[in-house]
Amino acid sequence: MTVDMPSDGLDPQRQAAQQQLERAVGEGRLTLDEFTDRAGRVWSADSEAALTRTVADLPARIVGQSTPARSTIIGLIGDISRRGRWSLRRRTTAVLLIGDVELDLRTATLAPGDEQDVQDVQVTTWSVIGDVALTVPEGVEVEIGGFTIIGDRKLDLAPVPRVQGTPVIRIRVFSLIGDVKVRSAP
């Protein structure tokens, strides 16, 4: 659900601030969780000073901060886990045979070059005999698709409105014998 803000003449400044945040998350200077928090502050700001404060302290680019993002993650007989500061492609696929997939998107950064369309992040998982667990920041919209054969699906998102300017996380899960759990956390 998107909340429409009344027009108060700050929309061009809000859009400029949003673009700065999108560049920062795309360059790995902000995690998705930090981006979500700041985007909420941008769109709820009631003055130009509040907007300036929201983007004034953006971190400088960190050289060598993370390994290059891969668009496909493959595991055979074992678990795949991504937590902490890691680089996420806008289109990411995880394939696993016998094991669990755990992806925490709260502290993920978008890979350079993928920041142009921060409105859409797609994660596709293929799993045979294993569970899939994804954690997303509060305030982002999540769409889940795909299928699960012999397993449960659980979507457990915080009852908060979508933060304007945050991406839609599209999760497609194809699972044989395993559970799928998607949750949000602060």
Image (cartoon, rainbow, N blue to C red):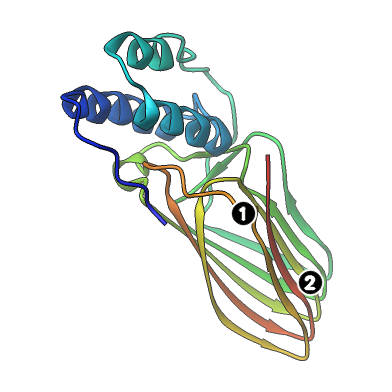
Q: Are marks 2 and 1 in contact (CB under 8 Å)?
A: no
Position above or below: 81 against 16? below
123 left or right of 9? right
19 left or right of 102? left
Across the whole image, how many numbered discs are drawn on residues?
2
Query: x, y percentage for residue 127?
Result: 70, 76
Q: What crowding class fits label 1: few (fewer than 14 Cα within 10 Å), some (14-19), or many (20 or more)?
A: few
- Residue type highlighted by circle 2: Asp
Q: Return the residue at label 2.
A: 131
Disc sitting over residue 159 in the figure = 1
Q: CA distance from mark 2 to mark 1?
A: 24 Å
Position above or below: 30 against 167? above
The image quadrant of residue 121 is bottom left
Give whichever of 18, 127 is nearer the camera.
Answer: 18
Question: Along the polypeptide, which appears first: circle 2 or circle 1?
Answer: 2
* Local SS, label 2: loop
Residue beneath the point at 29% across and 39% down? 5
Residue beneath the point at 56% across and 22% down? 64
Query: x, y percentage for residue 181?
Result: 73, 67
Residue beneath the point at 37% across and 13% down? 50
